[in-house]
Image (cartoon, helix red, strand yellow):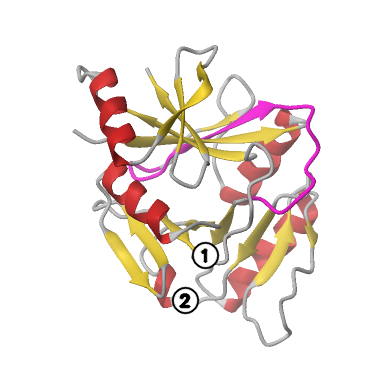
């Protein structure tokens, strides 16, 4: 038994606005609650925008790498982002870099990757959830989700579902010290009819820890991975 990735939680000062922005960028539908982006394909996950009063003060631990099929397609995607309220940002990229670095209306960083990127071949619109993290946390999530490692070199790791879809990658050292709750967090769930407590025990044996709050208002169990990143195990 392994956990299944079902959603990405995304803290937002204005959840409705951010949901509409990302629906436009990703070409997804917004659910009736107005703040959840539905999964369009079997290998996709939902994105849930949750209200927070906390302001963004530092780079996110995780960001989207969006794919492009052509240079024109990349330019059109960037233009769409700007039209919807995003903006260009400078994180030290050079003019020679083929990717375009942007931020959404609340300053959350993401990249639109140039066409022909071999690492993101055969993924999806969200080619990767690119993360700051250690090799150990890549190994943890590979075991937690049952996703094989598709990259493991120089302490950089990446995993992908056997069914394809977005990859999750970790850049290796140096890992930026964690100073607060991540604005982007993974939601996992156990298969229907399975023992959730047994799965939580398995995750803990792999290196997860129960958080101090433990249970969420929705009945989820709150854990942290070996790097201290929060995630939820849903009902």
Give the distance between the C-alpha atoms of the residues marked 1 and 2, in whole angstroms. Answer: 8 Å
Horizontal arrangement in the rendering, residue 198 relative to residue 212 (left or right)? left
Task: Decide: is 5 above or below 122.
Answer: above
When asked about the image quadrant of residue 223, the answer is: top left
Q: Residues within 10 Å of mark 2 (few under 14, many from 20)?
A: some
Q: Is residue 190 visible?
A: no
Relative to residue 199, is residue 72 depicted above or below? below
| Residue named by callout 2 | 117
Residue at horizontal 72 percent and vertical 83 percent from the top? 94
Residue 147: x percent and y percent? 27, 51
* Image x and y of residue 127, in percent: 47, 60
Sequence-wise, the earlier of marks 1 and 2 is: 1
For residue 163, the mark is: none
Q: Position of residue 89 (x, y in %)?
A: 79, 64
User: In the rendered image, is residue 23 in sight?
Assistant: yes
Q: Residue at x 72, y 61 (%)?
A: 102
Q: Are marks 1 and 2 in contact (CB under 8 Å)?
A: yes
Q: Nearer the viewer, residue 203 or 95?
A: 203
Instruction: Check disc 1 and report the residue beneath it.
Output: 67
Q: Quadrant of residue 121?
A: bottom left
Q: Secondary structure at mark 2?
A: loop
Residue located 31% across and 34% down the image:
203
Residue at left offset 46%, top offset 58%:
134
Please name the predominant secondary structure of the magenta segment in the image: loop
Q: Which residues are magenta?
A: 41-60
Quarter-of-image position of residue 209: top left
**Is 42 on the left or on the right of 14, as rendered?**
left
- Pointer 1 local density, CA inside 10 Å: few below 14, some 14–19, many at least 20: many
């Amino acid at each position: 038994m392994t956990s299944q990735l079902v959603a990405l939680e995304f803290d937002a000062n204005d959840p409705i606005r951010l949901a509409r922005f990302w629906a436009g960028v990703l070409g997804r539908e917004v659910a009736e609650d107005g703040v959840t982006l539905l999964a369009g394909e079997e290998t996709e996950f939902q994105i849930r925008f949750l209200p927070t009063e906390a302001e963004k003060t530092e780079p996110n631990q995780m960001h989207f790498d969006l794919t492009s099929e052509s240079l024109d397609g990349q330019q059109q995607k960037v233009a769409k982002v700007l039209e919807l309220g995003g903006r260009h940002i400078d994180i030290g990229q050079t003019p020679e870099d083929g990717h375009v670095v942007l931020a959404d209306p609340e300053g959350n960083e993401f990249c639109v990757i140039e066409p022909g990127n071999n690492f993101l071949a055969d993924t999806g619109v969200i080619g990767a959830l690119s993360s700051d993290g250690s090799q150990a946390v890549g190994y943890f999530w590979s075991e937690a989700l049952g996703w094989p490692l598709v990259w493991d070199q120089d302490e950089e790791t990446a995993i992908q579902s056997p069914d394809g879809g977005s990859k999750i990658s970790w850049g290796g050292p140096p890992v930026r010290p964690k100073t607060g709750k991540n604005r982007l967090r993974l939601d996992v769930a156990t298969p229907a009819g399975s023992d959730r407590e047994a799965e939580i025990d398995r995750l803990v044996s792999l290196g997860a820890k129960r958080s101090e709050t433990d249970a969420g208002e929705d009945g989820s169990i709150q854990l942290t991975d070996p790097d201290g990143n929060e995630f939820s195990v849903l009902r």
